[in-house]
Structure formats: structure tokens, C-alpha cells
């Protein structure tokens, strides 16, 4: 067994790097804005699906989105702190959240229950609210059994000047499968919810049910606004539309060794080399978001060729079987990218890990450096 001598190598390839292609986000936003019947809300929760909330927000607003959406109020503060003045909606908060601050910072809030409504109405300020109905997931939003009461209570709070009901929102549970009956049920329940709101005297201008999937495949769900997140960053759960993936993850080879046939690799010796080969060490592991369950199936790209990840993916590192020829230290390994050069994609990693692309892109760990091209260059995009 011999080990290739260490050699110095130059930045920027000396560390793992997550490169975000904001031109892809811009193009995806345009496509989604064209498809949507109404306004487009750019959902930038979970740090813009791991792509950088501020970068994705600014790019989307410059290319067709008119509003921003997040789950928690803390995510909304971050947008405001960065100077973003576009309308923002936050839809998932505890009943004792800082509603006064939301009013002060001009953040719309979703109201999914009577306790939430009471707390919002009691907080200082005039609150712009979106009543949130559960359209059939038994997850967030008001249960239909409480919806009519919620609408009437909201109308009373509106008459008292405490809140302004500007929207009604719902979310579909099966929109990634446009043929599923669950979509018709969700649409029907949402239409009923709007009717009940109107009957209670409310006049919500923003009526929004569709996320990425329904925006791409179901115009009947569009109403006056779409809330899209995954699609902005190139994820199409319906697999009907060519969106552009925006994330590329690379890392340098930090060690190369030649091993004999039958050499056990990594924890548990779950892999043994079938022949003499070169192994490359890559400083990325499950703490960086590469799913350990993909051990044994995952591939990466080295010098333009697919190479298997061998042995268990560790917390901080993985081993690549480079075949009969080694590579130089510092040479770049592409873990995933848009797929244009036959590199693995996020969709492939998701399949190897038996999960969805969303989980892969939002799971990239904080110690991986992120790099996105300056927005200034984007302004001149078509
Ligand atoms: C995350 C989320 C969205 C965005 O969904 P995508 O499928 O990523 O477009 C929209 N609405 C709600 C309530 C969400 O939680």
C-alpha cells in the first residue's frame, strides 16, 4: 500500500463548496410567474430551501414574484433586517408569538385557530391576517369544524379595528400526484372555506391554495396567488416541467491511497474492494447533509466520470473508489449538480436515500461554505 504524497493546492477548491446558481432561480421564477393565474409568492423558508433566503428572495422579487412567504416570524425578521420591504407572510407560529412586532414590521400572519386569533387581536397594532384552513391534511390550518366560528370571530375583530382579514389560505396534501382524488377534495374544501368567509362578511383579497405542484399542473387551484418554494430552486415534485436545479456541491480530494483487492473500507467494513484500486477521501459526510443511508449506492463525479462512494458515509468524510488510476490531491469531486455534465443530481441523491429532493437541499450543513454570484450581474438577465 502506498500513499500519494501530500501536495499543496490552491483555493477555492481547497474546501467543500456549495455553489448557488441564481440565474436558475431567476429562470424558474419567471416560468412559475407565467404559469400562475395570480400573484406569485416566493416561499423562502428554511433558508430559501438551503439556497440562501436573502439571495433567493431578492432574485425571485426581481423576476416575477411580488411577495415573500416564510414559516416562522424569526425568518420574517431576517428578511426585514436585510432591508427587504416586499410584503411578507409568516404562517406557522405559536399562539403566543410576537404579534405586536409583526404588525410593527409590516409582516402578514396566518391565523389557524381561535386561540391564535384572540392573541393576535389582543396584541398592539393593526394586524393583516390570512385565515388558514386545513384543506385535508390534518396538519396546519383550522379544522373545518371550527372554520365558521373562526370566520365570524375574525369578522368581529375586523369590525373592532384589531385585524384586517386580507387572505384565506390552504395547502394541498397530494398535489405532487395531479391524478389523486385528494386534490379535488382539497379544492372543494377550499372553495367552501372562501364561501363561509364571505358569508361571515369577510372580503379576503388574497386566496391562495397552490404551491409548486398545483401551480405547474392544476389551474383550478390557482385562485389569486400561488405560494412556491421548491420550484424556485428547481424542484418539480410532479416531474412534468423542466426546471433548473440551482445547487452544485463540490469538494476536494484530500487524500489518495492505493489499496489491494479485499481491503475493507470504512466503519463496519461493510465494503471490501474487489480489486486493487485507488481510494479518494472527500471531506463531506452526514453532518454536512449527505445521507448515511445512501452508503453503498451513491456516486460522485471525478474527472468527468461517475465513481462509487464505497463503505459507510461517515459524519465528516466519505471514500470514493477512483479505479485503476489515482487523481491529484485537491482535485475537485462533484457530489451533485444540475446534471448537465452527467454529474449526479440532487434527485439522484434523494433516490439513493429514499427521500425527496427537498430533504437533500435543506439538509446541507452549516460548515459547508456557500457561494452565490453577485446579484448585480443578474439584473441584466432577460
Ligand atoms: C412550504 C410551503 C409552501 C411551498 O411549497 P412548495 O411545494 O415548496 O412550492 C407553500 N405553502 C405552505 C403552507 C408551505 O408550508
Image: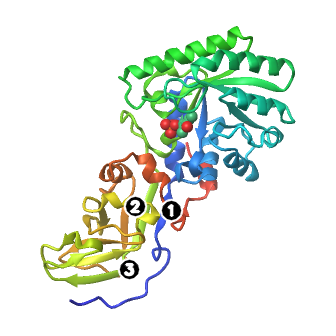
Q: Which mark is residue 206?
A: none
Q: How many residues crowd mark 2 within 10 Å: few (<14), some (14–19), many (20+)? A: many
**How far separated are the C-alphas under marks 1 and 3?**
19 Å
Residue at 42% from the left image edge and 66% from the top image edge = 250
State the image coordinates of residue 115 (x, y, percent, origin top left): 72, 30
For residue 33, above or below residue 155? below
Observer able to see residue 20: yes
Residue at 87% from the left image edge and 36% from the top image edge = 124
The C terminus appears in which quarter of the rendering?
top right
Q: How many residues crowd mark 1 within 10 Å: few (<14), some (14–19), many (20+)? A: some
**How far separated are the C-alphas under marks 2 and 3?**
17 Å
Q: Which image quadrant is residue 237 in?
A: top left
Q: Which residue is mark 1?
A: 365
265 vs 190, left or right, is left
Q: Which residue is mark 3?
A: 254
Q: Which residue is mark 2?
A: 290
32 vs 119, left or right, is left
SS class, disc 3: loop
SS class, disc 1: loop
State the image coordinates of residue 45 (x, y, percent, origin top left): 59, 45
The N terminus appears in which quarter of the rendering?
bottom left
Amino acid at each position: 500500500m502506498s500513499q500519494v504524497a501530500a501536495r499543496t493546492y490552491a483555493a477555492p477548491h481547497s474546501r467543500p463548496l456549495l455553489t448557488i446558481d441564481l440565474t436558475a432561480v431567476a429562470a424558474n421564477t419567471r416560468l412559475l410567474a407565467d404559469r400562475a393565474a395570480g400573484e406569485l409568492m416566493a416561499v423562502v423558508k428554511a433558508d430559501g430551501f438551503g439556497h440562501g433566503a436573502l439571495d433567493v428572495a431578492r432574485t425571485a422579487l426581481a423576476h416575477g414574484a411580488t411577495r415573500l412567504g416564510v414559516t416562522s416570524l424569526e425568518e420574517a425578521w431576517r428578511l426585514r433586517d436585510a432591508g427587504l420591504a416586499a410584503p411578507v407572510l409568516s404562517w406557522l407560529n405559536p399562539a403566543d408569538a410576537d404579534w405586536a412586532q409583526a404588525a410593527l414590521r409590516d409582516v402578514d400572519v396566518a391565523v389557524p385557530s381561535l386561540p391564535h386569533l384572540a392573541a393576535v387581536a389582543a396584541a398592539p397594532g393593526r394586524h393583516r391576517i390570512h385565515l388558514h384552513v386545513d384543506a385535508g391534511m390534518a396538519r396546519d390550518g383550522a379544522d373545518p369544524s371550527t372554520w365558521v366560528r373562526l370566520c365570524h370571530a375574525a369578522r368581529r375583530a375586523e369590525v373592532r379595528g384589531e385585524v384586517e382579514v386580507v387572505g384565506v389560505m390552504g395547502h394541498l396534501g397530494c398535489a405532487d400526484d395531479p391524478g389523486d382524488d385528494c386534490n379535488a377534495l382539497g379544492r372543494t374544501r377550499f372553495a367552501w372555506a372562501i364561501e363561509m368567509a364571505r358569508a361571515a362578511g369577510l372580503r379576503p383579497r388574497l386566496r391562495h391554495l397552490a404551491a409548486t405542484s398545483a401551480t405547474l399542473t392544476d389551474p383550478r387551484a390557482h385562485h389569486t396567488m400561488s405560494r412556491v418554494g421548491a420550484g424556485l430552486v428547481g424542484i418539480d415534485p410532479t416531474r412534468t416541467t423542466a426546471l433548473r436545479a440551482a445547487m452544485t456541491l463540490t469538494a476536494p480530494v484530500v487524500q489518495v491511497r492505493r489499496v489491494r483487492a479485499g481491503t475493507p473500507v470504512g466503519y463496519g467494513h461493510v465494503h471490501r474492494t474487489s480489486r486493487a484500486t485507488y481510494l479518494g477521501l472527500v471531506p463531506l459526510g452526514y453532518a454536512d447533509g449527505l445521507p448515511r443511508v445512501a452508503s453503498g449506492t451513491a456516486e460522485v463525479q471525478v474527472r468527468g466520470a461517475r465513481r462509487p462512494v464505497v463503505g459507510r458515509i461517515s459524519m465528516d468524510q466519505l471514500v470514493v473508489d477512483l479505479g485503476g488510476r489515482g487523481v491529484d490531491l485537491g482535485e475537485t469531486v462533484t457530489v451533485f449538480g444540475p446534471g448537465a455534465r452527467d454529474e449526479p443530481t440532487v434527485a439522484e441523491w434523494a433516490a439513493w436515500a429514499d427521500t425527496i429532493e427537498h430533504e437533500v437541499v435543506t439538509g446541507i450543513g452549516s460548515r459547508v461554505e456557500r457561494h452565490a454570484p453577485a446579484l448585480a450581474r443578474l439584473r441584466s438577465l432577460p
